[in-house]
Image (cartoon, rainbow, N blue to C red):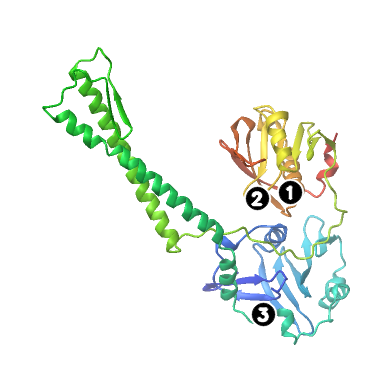
């Protein structure tokens, strides 16, 4: 939030012991930030708005936030019941030229403005336990007395992957040991240099030279000058290898020292705390024609192009290695653990906007993510390479990226075989 002369950050507790609203001046670090449907929803509605007031309801854990957008005042009500967060959002939608009411994800269109007063909005919260809590009971909100900076530090500390760091140190020590052994082998160039420069060296009857595993073979037809030339080439090659190994050793030692001095840390994925989010529709599962491999589902996109989606590691491998052609297009959610989806077309330009939106919505649904904006990565199947020992995992190249909006009605325009 921008205020004259300063930036203010509002931090919203999602529940599970984090109930309330905190005010700070520093943005959270990227290591403890993550995207989900709840965050994307508020970005969509609260970006580029004017905050007018923040009020606290004195009889329960309720906060009223009023903001100005599209020429109208809009309300956001946050209510923490037990360890769960509920929200009520009423806003003016210029597409329908009227107010919409959203109660923890469930949308009501064309709402009478008289039903959007503070008192009327509180009525909606009674079924979730409004006014049934002792607000003086500190046990119900243990984190409320902590400063936001302290909470962020604790969160970052809890995400440090100590197991990974320990394994990384072990790996680097082993790598350093191997580099040292290789350096001992290439140091033999000094022996060959002394040998070739010595006046006492007689190569006339030599067919093979060997020192510390480094061999130089001579052809029987070579004269002494030809043999010396072969030795000089070997020395040059060993010197080059020594330089490369020394650079690797230095880089490895620097990385190892940084880890030991806590200058480099690896973090686990942020575990999301989700507010209560109802849906206007029943939860739908992707069902359709399946193959002999459990977890593979086939269907057709709005344009009629076939697709296959895998819901487990074995299904992903089957789609890539058995079902698809090398020019088919492979899709995955960027930076998220997700299903694999392959479309039977050689050119991305053959896909319509609805096709691409359907691909993102299917991946988000099958992978159990709740995003309004879905980041995708895609490439042709021929640019995929399986990871040895990791079923369902691939390495990819020549990839491209895009972001699509989630569609609640994707099931209505996709035909499943």
Residue 222 point in image, percent of width and height = 23, 15
Instruction: Say which label, 1 or 3, has the lower sequence index.
Output: 3
Q: Give the residue at mark 2.
A: 336
Residue 60: in sight, yes or no?
yes
- State which quarter of the image contains the C terminus: top right
Instruction: Say which label, 2 or 1, has the lower sequence index.
Output: 2
Q: Give the residue at mark 3.
A: 144
Q: Give the residue at mark 1.
A: 367
Secondary structure under tag 3 reads: loop
Q: Are marks 2 and 1 in contact (CB under 8 Å)?
A: yes
Residue at the spot x=25%, y=23% of the render?
230
Residue 330 to residue 3: above or below: above
Quadrant in which residue 399 is drawn: top right
* Residues at marks 2 and 3, CA–CA distance in whole angstroms: 31 Å
Q: Do the residues labelled 1 and 3 touch (CB within 8 Å)?
A: no
Residue 166 point in image, percent of width and height = 51, 58
* Residues at marks 1 and 3, CA–CA distance in whole angstroms: 34 Å
Residue 2: in sight, yes or no?
no
Instruction: Say which label, 2 or 3, has the lower sequence index.
Output: 3
Badge 1: how crowded within 10 Å, few (<14), some, or many (20+)?
A: some
Residue at the spot x=59%, y=78% of the render?
147
- State which quarter of the image contains the N terminus: bottom right
Q: Nearer the viewer, residue 164 or 319?
A: 164
Residue 333 point in image, percent of width and height = 66, 46
């Amino acid at each position: 939030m921008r205020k004259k002369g300063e930036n203010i950050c509002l931090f919203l507790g999602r529940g599970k012991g984090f109930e309330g609203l905190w005010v700070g001046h520093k943005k959270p670090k990227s290591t403890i930030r993550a995207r989900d449907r709840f965050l994307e929803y508020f970005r969509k509605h609260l970006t580029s708005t004017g905050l007018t007031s923040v009020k606290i309801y004195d009889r329960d854990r309720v906060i009223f936030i009023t903001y100005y957008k599209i020429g109208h005042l809009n309300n956001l009500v946050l209510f923490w019941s037990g360890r769960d967060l509920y929200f009520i959002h009423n806003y003016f939608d210029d597409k329908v030229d009227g107010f919409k009411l959203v109660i923890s994800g469930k949308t009501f269109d064309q709402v009478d403005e008289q039903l959007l007063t503070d008192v009327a909005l509180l009525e909606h919260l009674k079924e979730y336990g409004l006014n049934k809590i002792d607000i003086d009971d500190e046990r119900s909100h243990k984190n409320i007395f902590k400063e936001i900076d302290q909470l962020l530090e604790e969160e970052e500390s809890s995400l440090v992957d100590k197991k990974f760091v320990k394994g990384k140190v072990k790996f680097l020590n082993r790598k350093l040991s191997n580099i040292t052994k290789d350096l001992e082998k290439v140091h033999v160039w000094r022996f060959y240099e002394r040998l070739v420069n010595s006046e006492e060296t007689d190569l006339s009857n030599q067919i093979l030279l060997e020192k510390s595993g480094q061999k130089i073979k001579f052809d029987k037809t070579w004269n002494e000058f030809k043999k010396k030339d072969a030795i000089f080439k070997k020395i040059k090659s060993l010197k080059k290898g020594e330089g490369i190994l020394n650079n690797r050793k230095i880089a490895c030692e620097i990385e190892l020292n940084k880890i030991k001095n806590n200058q480099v840390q690896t973090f686990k994925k942020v575990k999301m705390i989700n507010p209560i989010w109802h849906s206007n529709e029943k939860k739908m599962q992707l069902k359709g024609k399946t193959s002999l491999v459990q977890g593979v589902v086939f269907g057709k996109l709005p344009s009629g192009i076939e697709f296959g989606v895998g819901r487990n590691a074995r299904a992903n491998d089957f789609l890539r290695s058995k079902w698809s052609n090398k020019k088919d297009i492979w899709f995955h959610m960027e930076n998220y653990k997700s299903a694999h989806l392959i479309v039977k077309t050689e050119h991305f330009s053959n896909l319509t906007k609805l096709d691409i939106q359907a691909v993102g919505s299917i991946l988000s649904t099958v992978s159990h993510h709740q995003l309004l904006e879905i980041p995708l990565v895609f490439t042709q199947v021929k640019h995929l390479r399986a990871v040895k020992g990791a079923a369902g995992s691939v390495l990819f190249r020549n990839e491209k990226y895009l972001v699509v909006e989630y569609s609640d009605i994707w099931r209505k325009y996709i035909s499943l075989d």
